[in-house]
Image (spheres, rainbow, N blue to C red):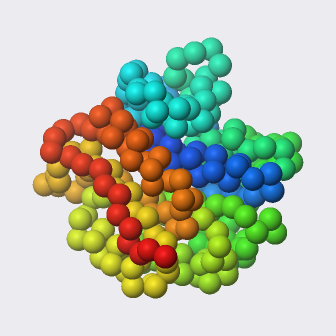
Amino acid sequence: MNYRHAYHAGNFADVVKHAVLARLVEYLKQKDKAFRVIDTHAGIGRYNLASVEAGKTGEWQTGIGRLVESALEPQAAALLQPYLEAVRARNPDGGLKYYPGSPLIVRHLLRNQDRLTAIELHPEDAARLKSVFAGDFQTRVIELDGWLALGAQLPPKEKRGLVLIDPPFEEEGEFSRLVEGLQKAHRRWPGGIYALWYPIKDRKAVTAFRTALTETGIPKLLDIAFEIRPASNEPSLDGSGLVVVNPPYTLESELRLMLPVLHKALALRQPSRWSLDWLAGE
Ligand SMILES: C[S@@+](CC[C@H](N)C(=O)[O-])C[C@H]1O[C@@H](n2cnc3c(N)ncnc32)[C@H](O)[C@@H]1O
């Protein structure tokens, strides 16, 4: 496990993932009934954008750095507000010194009745995450293999909620593990919302992943693809995707307002595109 999210925190892929994540949490809040968010690959929670790691890649500057400098159209600004509020909450003195990872973004948005389970396998990262949430009775941090959690932690007792599956893609076979993980999880909890992150780097692998998801027979799969530049000659992160299973009925129309605005702010080189496709309907 060499992957360290500190090099990438706040990049374009984090921005898109976290903006969608915040919309999913906001949807769950429309009913009073409690829900749980399970983050199977949670990271360290809080990222210092002045760290050596963040400075080495500078990726956040073309991600959250650009977004906060962009003039946003009002409808998209309203949809992005919960996410941007979560970022601002980590930077109470203004500016952008810290970036919240997925567990802190979710936690910022939870109500008193809601719960978060954050899972992280790397012992050092899990320890840091535990210290971020020390004393927080609404959040449980578990040092565990996130793929196992898709069995052991599902369904949650609240029977409402969301599972974020955001693996590092540092090892071969991660696309297959995502498909198998979703199948296992969906068998245990067909009614949950799932968000599966994937890189757009190897286009053939992405096409095969989408086909494999369709072939699972799992209904209601909405695929969000967000590319910041045309395909590179050498493998590099040209875009990222998120497959949302059981998306809220409001999500597609929200994304049609949000994604063009994010794309305008974050695209690095044209031609590049974003798209929304149903890999499986009802
Ligand atoms: C892409 S990062 C997570 C970023 C985080 N979800 C966010 O959006 O802020 C992936 C994380 O998964 C952790 N990890 C790697 N393999 C894992 C596994 N099998 N189970 C749980 N966590 C794992 C890595 O240590 C890393 O912190």
Looking at the image, residue 3 lies above or below residue 57: below
Q: On the rendered structure, is 204 left or right of 73?
A: left
Looking at the image, residue 42 lies above or below residue 218: above
Name the residue rendered at 38%, 23% in the picture: 70
Q: Residue 98's spot in the image, x, y percent?
A: 56, 29
Looking at the image, residue 103 lies above or below residue 90: below
Q: Nearer the viewer, residue 135 or 102?
A: 102
Q: How many marks?
A: 0
Q: On the rendered structure, is 81 left or right of 15?
A: right
Q: Nearer the viewer, residue 63 or 186?
A: 186
Name the residue rendered at 16%, 41% in the picture: 270
Q: Nearer the viewer, residue 140 or 259?
A: 259
Looking at the image, residue 79 lies above or below residue 253: above
> Residue furthest toward the top?
93
Q: Residue 95's spot in the image, x, y percent?
A: 52, 17
Name the residue rendered at 46%, 27% in the picture: 74
Q: Residue 117's spot in the image, x, y percent?
A: 73, 58
Name the residue rendered at 45%, 34% in the picture: 76
Residue 211, can we see it? yes
Residue 2, can we see it? no
